[in-house]
Amino acid sequence: MISFADLCLRRGSKELLSGASGFIYSGERIGIIGRNGCGKSSLFAALQGELSPDSGQLNLPRDLRISSVAQQTPALTCSAVDYVMSGDKTVARLLEQKERAYAQGGAQIALVEERLTEAGLWTLRPRCEELLHGLGFAQEELTKPVAQFSGGWRMRLNLAQALICPADLLLLDEPTNHLDLDTISFLQDYLKHCQATVLCISHDRFFLDSIATHILHFEGGKLIKYPGNYSAYERQRAERIKNERAQRSKEEAALSRMQAFVDRFRYKASKARQAQSMLKAMDRLKLTAVTQEESPYSIVFQDPGRTVDVLADLGDLDAGYETAHPVLHDIKLSLYAGDRVGLLGSNGKGKSTFIKTLCGVLSPLKGKVALGKDVKIGYFAQHEQDALREDLTALDNLKLLDPKAREKDLRAFLGSFNFSGDLALQKVSSLSGGEQARLALAQVAYTKPNLLLLDEPTNHLDLDMREALEVALASYPGALILVSHDRYLLDAICDKLWVIEEGTIREFAGDLNDYNERLKEQQRAYAASLRSQGRADTERPALGAKEQRRQEAAFRESLKPLKQKLKTCEGELEKVQKRLTEIDAQLSDTKLYAGDSGNIEKLLKERSELSTQQEELEAQWLTVQDELEKKESEHEQNS
């Protein structure tokens, strides 16, 4: 158990924590959240003894084994897998003892060999190989020297090294920043089966929902611990804020701002593939409406006005940097008005290359990118600094887009992105990564595009800004293509998925749950291949292929009643929503109010009953869906 009492931490003259008290128990997986600069990384430094408390107590168990991700990776000549294996400090120490024992001879040799077996030396390499594969490394890259990897891939090696190290406390600071959606899915499953206590700083809501047993929130110089995952934290914090608030006027104002977002999903609930994401987003955003009152952001993407039906037509498109070696080939896709596309695929497969080709930063190697008439693209680059003049202020950067605009109007617009006062007059070079990302988004929003191309827009953004961006994009009427490892954002915003595989882009016939399940199946197949070669530790006897198929068939059969309930519920929802639409159309007709008032009362009564029925059906749908997810999760863990 880790305890802290009246803990105070400072960085320079800035007070980060004041009088914070609480406990962290063994085996908890705690998501640590708070705005940028609140002290999350400083807490990690204190836990590792790198920063001393200014006052109060921070008590750690004696001999606590702590593992964290190194921030630097030297250009080593050893292979990737050997580098990760060296992260197991217990094995490394025992190997040193083994060398000394062999040099001295005697009975000590057998003892060290026994301890090495207990420490898992003989399964260490296959465990490291499986871990590296899950983090996106190809088989042929495992023997590649560390020095030949780029900075982002070296960070993955550091993450793998931290994960393989036997530890009582695992400290992770934004572990998903250098990962794609594929590898984040693997990391989620890995951490859920981790035996260590996990403290994880993250702004990725879906990731925290998946792994966290508790949330630790930096709030007003205090640490407030909430039981449950991020969604549970939102509910509890929203309730606490409501209980503490003297008046309800602010809540009503916040709910009004969110209404456009909620409405977007309410009338799509019958879409089988997207229903789960949208219904859950509705419930979560009702809570977000309360907590967003404290947010300093109120961003909006303006209506771009009328646009053509076909925004982009891609025919036999090859994209990349060399004609002889295209990154992507034979792309045949069309983008229509109102499309909201999530672009999926592991890092390095060509997502950014495709976005750059679509917006004209890169020329097609072959084929065409035909944009519709008056299509105006708003492009947010993954490296947002590329879109900014670092020698100019935030205000001056915006002036470059609209030299004739009044400074008062420009400052008001920047204020919605929390660039108010002196911050708007700071040079870009002095802004943090999160502030630069916000400014780049502000520039994109200011141009009123009818097609948004967003390449990892949430990198460096804190949770408040991510939620504000989600709300703004949900009510944006134009088309968009989104590249993001933020599962919540993809779930809430996109109703169509494109996937990069085998060097091209295809539409994916499913939702993010289907895509995630396919990734897990691929990882299971890889782990099985290692076991079949006799190189992995098998904790349970493998089933025969015939018996495994029989069990899988029996499991699918057991899910049929739940899936039938979902289908029935969706059908009822569609009928209710269709009738609600008809009633709303009648109530909006002014002629109705010139006739018998009894008809109005009858319609209003029916609408009220249907709204109640709709809420009950939605709640029923979620209950059944949660039960289905639970069964699938249990089956996955046991398989």
Image (cartoon, helix red, strand yellow):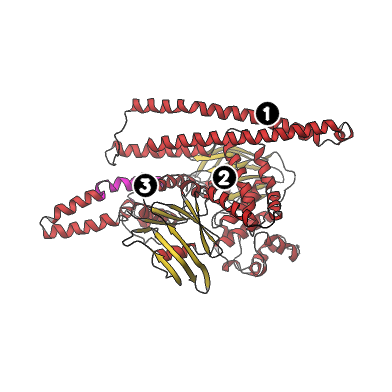
**Front-most of 540 and 73?**
540
Question: What span is colored magenta in the figure?
Answer: 119-143
Which of the two labelled residues, at mark 3 and mark 1, occupies the earlier sequence position? 3
Give, as a three-letter code, the residue at label 3: Leu
At label 2, counting other C-alpha atoms closer than 10 Å, the crowd grade (few under 14, some 14-19, many 20 or more) is many
Give, as a three-letter code, the residue at label 1: Lys
Q: Quadrant of residue 275?
A: top right
Which of the two labelled residues, at mark 3 and mark 2, occupies the earlier sequence position? 3
Local SS, label 1: helix
Q: Position of residue 580 (x, y in %)?
A: 72, 33
Give, as a three-letter code, the residue at label 2: Leu
Q: Position of residue 637 (x, y in %)?
A: 40, 38
Query: Is 136 one of the magenta-colored residues?
Result: yes
At label 1, counting other C-alpha atoms closer than 10 Å, the crowd grade (few under 14, some 14-19, many 20 or more) is few
Q: Inspect this view and state whether residue 468 appears.
A: no
The residue beneath circle 3 is 131
Q: CA distance from mark 3 to mark 2?
A: 26 Å
The residue beneath circle 2 is 490
Labelled pair 3, 2 in contact (Cβ < 8 Å) = no
